[in-house]
Image (cartoon, grey):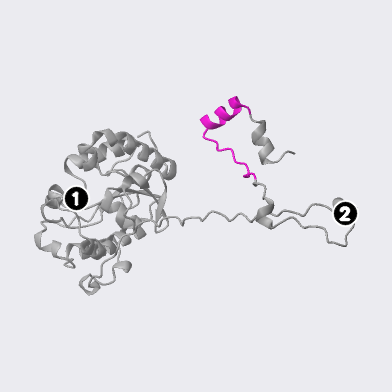
Amino acid sequence: MSDGRSFVADLDARQRAMLAEMGVRVWAPKAVAPVEPADLGERAQPAASEDPAHAAARPEPVRVAPPVQPAPVAPAPARPSVTVPAVDVALRPQGIDQMDWDGLRAAVAGCQACALHRGRTNTVFGTGDVSADWMVVGEAPGENEDLQGEPFVGAAGQLLDRMLQAVGRSRQGQGAQGVYIANVLKCRPPANRNPQPPEIAQCEPFLVRQVAMLRPRLILAMGRFAVQTLLGSTEPIGRLRGTVHHYQGVPVVVTYHPAYLLRNPIDKRKAWADLCLAMDIGGTPLRR
């Protein structure tokens, strides 16, 4: 068998071009440059008492090349993570991790753990079948959600309903045809501003309990703040799409928020690809 150098030398120009088109990098060990005598000192001279004929027959001294130092390998960059702010946990309702659905809903309705409770019309607990095997997690209620007390209403909600219908599910469906929808925040931020880290930190235990009781086969995370909360990462959605993540042991598929898709319809095809991935992972009956 020939070594790497002879293998590369045997490749003709056509084969090299084919490998280049395939994106294959041909590896071969680097040839070791011969070491000049000056690098090793003067060649040994025969001793004065040595027979010149014997000296001529003596083998050449072995020239040893200096060892090749491996190239330094840069460590893989760490995925940026969300910084969890310190919050006063005493302000939260106690025993959230032991509540049933009715108790959790009542705790959300009476929660005053952050300042958002001062401006809310309604809390937005969640909607759908609690036996559904899919869960959609959004970001925070908007004006329409605050007025109606239900997540994903208005134009964004209508788009979400069409997306779910395309894969044979709906918020009115049951079990494998249903879906449970919840937000990271249960109260509307003023003027629909972005959720703030302390607000998310105070509200997250409600979502944790919802996931624990629902035990879905799949979570569809929609929007930046839903993704950051579930995955603990500040990576852009574009870098997190197309990969199956996990939250509390449940597979998570990342996609864009319907409100974003209304502003950027060109990305609807990417959202459909995300739904296809969700179907591969969580299963769905396409016929209704």
User: Label 2 amino acid?
Assistant: Pro
Q: Nearer the viewer, residue 138 or 110?
A: 138
Task: Find out whether residue 200 is within the magenta segment.
Answer: no
Indicate whether 171 appears above or below 248.
above
Please report the bounds of the magenta region as a residue range.
Answer: 12-31
Q: Nearer the viewer, residue 172 or 91?
A: 91
Disc 2 or 1, which lies upstream in sequence?
Answer: 2
Q: Residue at x 27, y 48 (%)?
A: 223
- Look at discs 2 and 1 and give the one toward the viewer: 2
User: Label 1 amino acid?
Assistant: Glu
Q: Say left or right for 113 vs 227.
A: left
Q: Residue at x 59, y 25 (%)?
A: 14
Q: Residues within 10 Å of mark 1 (few under 14, many from 20)?
A: many
- Look at mark 2 in the image and give the residue it sits on: 52
Q: Nearer the viewer, residue 9 or 268?
A: 9
Indicate whether 283 appears above or below 216.
above
Secondary structure category for the residue under label 2: helix
For the C terminus, the quadrant is top left
- Look at mark 1 in the image and give the residue it sits on: 150
Q: Say left or right for 69 vs 40.
A: left
- Would residue 65 be seen by someone viewing this image from the given angle? no
Residue 57: x and y, percent? 87, 51
- Would residue 196 be seen by someone viewing this image from the given angle? yes
Q: Residue at x 73, y 38 (%)?
A: 2
Q: Residue at x 16, y 42 (%)?
A: 154
The image quadrant that residue 119 belongs to is bottom left
